[in-house]
Image (cartoon, rainbow, N blue to C red):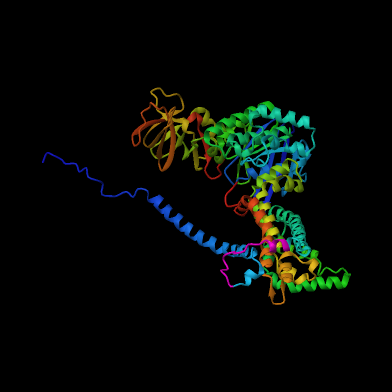
Amino acid sequence: MADVALRKVVKRYDDVEAVRGIDLDIADHEFIVLVGPSGCGKSTTLRMIAGLEDISDGDIMIGGDIVNDVPPKDRDIAMVFQNYALYPHMTVAENMSFGLRLKHYPKAEIKARVTEAARLLDITDLIDRKPKQLSGGQRQRVAMGRAIVRNPKVFLFDEPLSNLDAKLRVQMRIEIKKVHQKVRTTTVYVTHDQVEAMTLADRVVVMNKGRIEQIGTPNELYHRPATRFVAGFIGSPAMNFLPCRLEDVGGTLQIRLTDRIAFALPPARAARYNSLPRTDKLLLGLRPEHLTEAHAHLGPGVETFDTVLDVTEPMGMETLVYFVLEGTPVCGRVDPNAGAKDGAPMRLAMDLNNMHLLNEATGVVL
Amino acid sequence: MSSVTIDKAAPTRTVKLGSMSRDRKWALRWSYFFLTLFAIFSLLPPIYMLITSLKSSAEISAATNPWWVFHPTLENYVGLLTSNQFLRFFLNSALVSIFVVTITMLISVPAAFALARMRFWGSATLATGVFLTYLIPDSLLFIPLFKVFAQFGDWTGIQLINRWYVLLFIYPTLTVPFCTWIMIGYFASIPKELDEAAIIDGASWFQTLTRIFIPVALPGLIAATIFAFTVSWAQFLYPLVFTTSTDQLVLPVGIITTLIKGDVFNWGQIMTGALLGAAPPLIIYAFLMDYYIAGLTAGATKG
């Protein structure tokens, strides 16, 4: 068990900077998820923590010691790979015990640890099988077992669920969470799937183009994104961004979306945005769940407008509605019984209490 | 115009039922035809050798049907297998092959591992270079090599020429490049994560090679071994050039030099010797065929 710290870590490949100076503190026992689109540097960061990639600049610390030049085997870490990377010629038990056998642990202890890990992961029956006799989910468990038996300071997961089908992925996600609750080892987990990130993490690190966009708990990222990238990346369907500007009408602050549509801001929001220059080009960020069917009784800060739906997607518990607002495609979430139909007009409500306002040029959430 | 007749006749488009299987049938017929042709072509010489080996010298030179044995005899076999000279050739061949295979594997497996995995400056160029050396024919190399060993003998006083073990230095020039190349391909098909997992598990490069790569690449290793064995067992030019004394000869050269006396060809024994000489590779192939094919087709599909 140990904390992990990254200090201005840089990775350069020839003249390309894959990771551009990352600072990150991971507390002991913490489950951290690095998430971002492909090429954002998240896997490179993980591999640098593992020691599989040299770092070009900065420091990496595990348990307070700088490990920049420490080889992977001496970093006391364990890694789970996307394609499992099980040794095909070894049985499950041999796969799990390989690291311990290399370190010449006593046989009795190896057996005890493997048995315990197998029990934890529910693979006791498979212990004598070869990897090719296992399903994808079982292989992933063995890969985790191989990490657990080593009892390392840090677990590193590199997109461990990406090779599994959707149903199994959900199941294994819960398994991973359960395992972490039991063993409490500091974990760094890389994924491109924001749902995985949200569900697993104590804190999520959103990366983009080799930089950290934002670090926060899943709820912080969802409700208080710092940038347009985070706001758009976290949440599915993604947040809507509508071009808008602020204007004063009769002493109240209004947000104008189009020539036809303008809404008065709720008092709390008005106070927050009042100091902004009225000339700035802004974006109204609104999650689909805050664009719903209009009810007869509207709460404060909820405004209605009429539109014509392009496409509807019934999801069962909700229906996603897609429409265009002044050239911007928008997605909303309505009740399945609200009568949303493809091509039909509908009155929708916008909950401005949950709005975000972004600077269009900088992408910063205001 | 109230009645509408529905034409229940057969649809105009005739569905060619089983056209796939007909294609397949024809493909199979052609395959069998050419395979039979090829089998006849490649099996006739050994059959002719077998027939001849069972004949006495008198019957061979007699003007009878060469494709039939009228008076079968094992005298050629008995003659060769009781001849110390022939057994010496056999032993020399066996020693050379076993040592060459061992030397080749000891060099080419670590070399292939280094070239395939430990990316270092110039490794890709080196890998290509290794293969290019294989393309230089032995008929070009034997004179310079002979000079090298002659010079070496002059300088050090260690005379290697006309010793069977000189071949242990020469054959690897043929076997190492090819085996290294096979093994590079095979090692390259092993997912990179496997060695990364081993490294994180605490394995050294050497342990990664011996405990992960060699077991996983075993079919490739066996293919390379068979190749090295076949090359060293069947090599003719180098032993012809480098060895002359009868006790230093290997089988292919020994048969030719001792069983052809001037213009007298002892055909019966030549054929017998050739057949007996072909037996060891044949037996090895028979046992390891599956591995050999798996080795040569490795990398075509993952897994």
Most extreme residue toward the right is B157
Most extreme residue toward the top is A297
Residue B92 drawn above or below residue B290: below
Give residue B265's position: percent from left, percent from top. 68, 73
- Range of residues picked out in magenta: B63-79
Give residue B235's position: percent from left, percent from top. 70, 65
Most extreme residue toward the front is B71
Q: Write down the quadrant of residue B27 in the picture.
A: bottom left
Q: Main secondary structure of the magenta part?
A: loop
Question: Image quadrant for the N terminus of chain B?
Answer: top left
Residue A4 drawn above or below residue B136: above
**Exactly how many numbered labels are in the figure?**
0
Give residue A123's position: percent from left, percent from top. 64, 30
Is-magenta flag for residue B172? no
| Residue A187, visible in the rendered structure | no
Residue B174 drawn above or below residue B19: below
Give residue B206's position: percent from left, percent from top. 76, 48
Please tell me which residue lies in front, B163 or B83.
B83
Most extreme residue toward the left is B1
Please tell me which residue lies in front, A179 or A8.
A179
Please tell me which residue lies in front, A17 or B133.
B133
Q: Write down the quadrant of residue B55 in the picture.
A: bottom right
Please tell me which residue lies in front, B98 or A113.
B98
| Residue A154, visible in the rendered structure | yes
Task: Answer with left or right where residue B172 lies relative to residue A276.
Answer: right
Is-magenta flag for residue B73? yes
Task: Answer with left or right where residue A285 lies relative to residue B11.
Answer: right
